[in-house]
Image (cartoon, grey):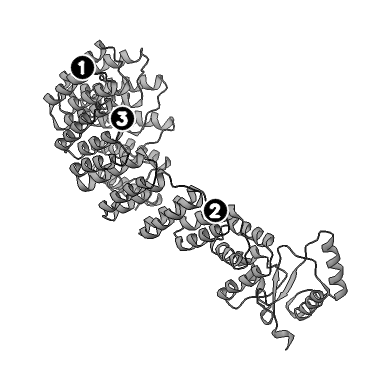
């Protein structure tokens, strides 16, 4: 056979000491590579290099038919090696100028390189492949090691399984997981959960259940996340009854009665089958030793209230009482929020009376829910009554309480009362925040009381509170609406000096207002400030500017402005 048609393979990782036969083979390779730019060496030089290897110097190891590098295509390999990271990871050196005929050819021939290695070498390559994210190659290596009865590095297998599952290569993840278990490894619960979650997401529910059984036998018992994932997948596929049977079967097998899983199941039943069916399942599962608690019932109350199903929420309340339990503050607050949203004020009063008679007295959250509902319904007087009732019962308001009242007062025109309450807040343990000031400024600006709004704005700055876009927009809106465009322009300049961002909408409002007042010069200045601030005006702004200049009898200036806008690359 002609040497020029020989197939040789080169591997750079973990190079053993070459025997004389291998040295002679390498000599032949170097002779054949003379025309391709490889340095020609004699056997003596190669033996000298082999001696250096004994002293710690790495040297290429050449095998016949290992990586099938074609020596008749030696001219193009360097570019291929630079572009193919797989080659570098598995050790094809830059000095070996050989190029495989196809990528597929290389992939299939890498297995041969793995076959020649011992367990330690393959495991080190496996760690490198996982470290570089080469999941497909790492998976292939694990399969080769399994055929060779080599035990793979278990931490690398764990990382590989998780990585494959996360990129939706669940079949390969399952293959590696099976090899790991058959080799004596024990995947942790997180790895199992990631794989099961991926199987459920793809709809492979039967495979997920089989893996659950394997998980129970492998030494990594399922946890809450495992069961929740499978139950949710069953309900998502419309198999509510299967989900119910699954949980009952798990309880019979000795699964701990996880309350979180129980609550998730009951809420899913309520969502898909209704509260009546959920109550039935509650009784059935109680026979298996899994009893509901107030958290489970509260989740049902919350779901029905959010759906506006107050009759079914009442059914759940009766079930709570029949089980010898008492609704708690969360139960009452959930009901109150729903009743306030629907305007059932008599029922609200009734529930409050019940709360005063129990150990679960109204809290600040309870009062906030009530006052927010009353303010939204326009019943500010009753909200203020609850505020004083709250104080009389030694329940301290929080900033949410004050913000709710201040917003309602501002909308109702009770400006002086709102400002007084704001001043009162400054001397309490609950000082005003950005939302508080924004609420007052917006209310004042909408009522046209821009001077008072500016006063609150400067007070806000004195207290070190940085205004946001809502603050600026409210101020500029109020000033422009009050025909105080020049004052709005000053505010915007002040804001710009403080390096606070201004949105295009605020600039637009000011520029259009200036144009309507024929303040063209100031409008153009604002346009320049806008552009230097990185904001790009829209078509309305520049068309209004040009029309304003032309209508003022300055047609030449309008034409010049249009040219300037084109220079600024404004279409």
Between label 1 and label 3, give the one nearer the viewer.
1
Place of residue 570 in the rendered image (x, y in percent of width and height, measured from the top left): 36, 51
Place of residue 327 in the rendered image (x, y in percent of width and height, measured from the top left): 24, 27
Depth order, front residue of 226/280: 280
Task: Return the mark for residue 488.
Answer: 3
Specify which label sits upstream in the sequence, 1 or 3: 1
Callout 2 secondary element: helix
Depth order, front residue of 542/459: 459
Q: Is residue 549 visible?
A: no
Specify which label sits upstream in the sequence, 2 or 1: 2
Q: Residue at x 26, y 18 (%)?
A: 359
Above/below status of 51 relative to 564: below
Q: Residue at x 68, y 65 (%)?
A: 91
For the residues marked 2 and 1, what is the alpha-carbon distance in whole angstroms? 57 Å
Q: Residues within 10 Å of mark 2 (few under 14, many from 20)?
A: many
Q: Residue at x 33, y 47 (%)?
A: 247
Task: Return the mark for residue 158.
Answer: 2
Disc 1 target residue: 357
Depth order, front residue of 282/19: 282
Rendered image quadrant of residue 35: bottom right
Q: Is residue 356 visible?
A: yes
């Amino acid at each position: 056979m002609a040497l020029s048609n020989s197939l040789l393979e080169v591997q750079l990782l973990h190079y053993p000491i070459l025997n004389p036969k291998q040295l002679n083979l390498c000599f032949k390779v170097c002779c054949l590579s003379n025309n391709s730019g490889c340095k020609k060496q004699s056997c003596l030089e190669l033996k000298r290099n082999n001696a250096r290897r004994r002293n710690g110097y790495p040297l290429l190891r050449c095998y016949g038919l290992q990586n099938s590098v074609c020596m008749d295509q030696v001219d193009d390999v360097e570019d291929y090696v630079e572009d193919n990271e797989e080659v570098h990871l598995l050790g094809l050196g830059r000095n070996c100028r050989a190029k495989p005929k196809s990528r597929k050819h290389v992939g299939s021939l890498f297995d041969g390189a793995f076959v020649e290695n011992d367990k330690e070498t393959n495991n080190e390559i496996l760690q490198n492949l996982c470290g570089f994210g080469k999941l497909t190659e790492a998976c292939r290596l694990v399969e080769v090691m399994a055929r060779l009865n080599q035990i793979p590095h278990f931490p690398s297998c764990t990382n590989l399984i998780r990585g494959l599952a996360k990129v939706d290569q669940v079949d390969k993840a399952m293959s590696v997981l099976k090899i790991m278990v058959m080799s004596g490894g024990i995947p942790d619960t997180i790895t199992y959960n990631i794989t099961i979650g991926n199987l459920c997401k793809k709809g492979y529910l039967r495979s997920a259940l089989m893996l659950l059984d394997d998980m129970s036998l492998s030494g990594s018992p399922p946890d809450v996340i495992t069961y929740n994932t499978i139950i949710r997948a069953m309900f998502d596929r419309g198999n509510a009854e299967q989900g119910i049977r699954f949980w009952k079967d798990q309880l019979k097998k000795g699964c701990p009665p996880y309350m979180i899983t129980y609550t998730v199941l009951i809420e899913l039943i309520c969502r898909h089958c209704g509260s009546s069916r959920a109550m039935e399942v509650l009784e059935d599962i109680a026979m298996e030793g899994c009893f509901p608690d107030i958290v489970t019932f509260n989740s049902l109350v919350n779901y029905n209230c959010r759906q506006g199903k107050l009759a079914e929420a009442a059914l759940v309340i009766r079930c709570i009482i029949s089980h010898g339990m008492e609704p708690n503050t969360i139960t009452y607050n959930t009901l109150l929020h729903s009743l306030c949203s629907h305007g059932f004020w008599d029922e609200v009063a009734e529930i409050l009376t019940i709360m005063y008679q129990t150990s679960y007295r109204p809290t600040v959250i309870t009062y906030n829910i009530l006052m927010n509902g009353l303010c939204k319904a326009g019943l500010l007087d009753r909200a203020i009554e609850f505020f004083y009732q709250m104080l009389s019962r030694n329940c301290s308001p929080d900033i949410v309480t004050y913000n709710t009242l201040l917003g309602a007062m501002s909308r109702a025109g009770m400006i002086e009362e709102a400002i007084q309450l704001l001043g009162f807040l400054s001397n309490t343990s609950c000082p005003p925040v950005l939302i508080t000031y924004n609420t007052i400024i917006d209310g004042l600006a909408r009522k046209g009381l821009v001077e008072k709004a500016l006063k609150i704005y400067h007070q806000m700055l004195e207290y070190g509170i940085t205004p946001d876009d809502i603050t600026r927009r409210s101020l500029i809106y109020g000033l422009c609406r009050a025909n105080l465009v020049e004052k709005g322009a000053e505010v915007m300049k002040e804001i710009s000096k403080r390096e606070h961002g201004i949105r295009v909408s605020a600039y637009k409002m000011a520029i259009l207002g200036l144009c309507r007042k024929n303040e063209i010069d100031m409008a153009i200045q604002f346009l320049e400030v806008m552009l230097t601030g990185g904001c790009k005006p829209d078509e309305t702004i520049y068309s209004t500017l040009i029309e304003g200049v032309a209508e003022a009898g300055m047609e030449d200036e309008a034409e010049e402005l249009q040219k300037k806008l084109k220079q600024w690359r404004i279409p």
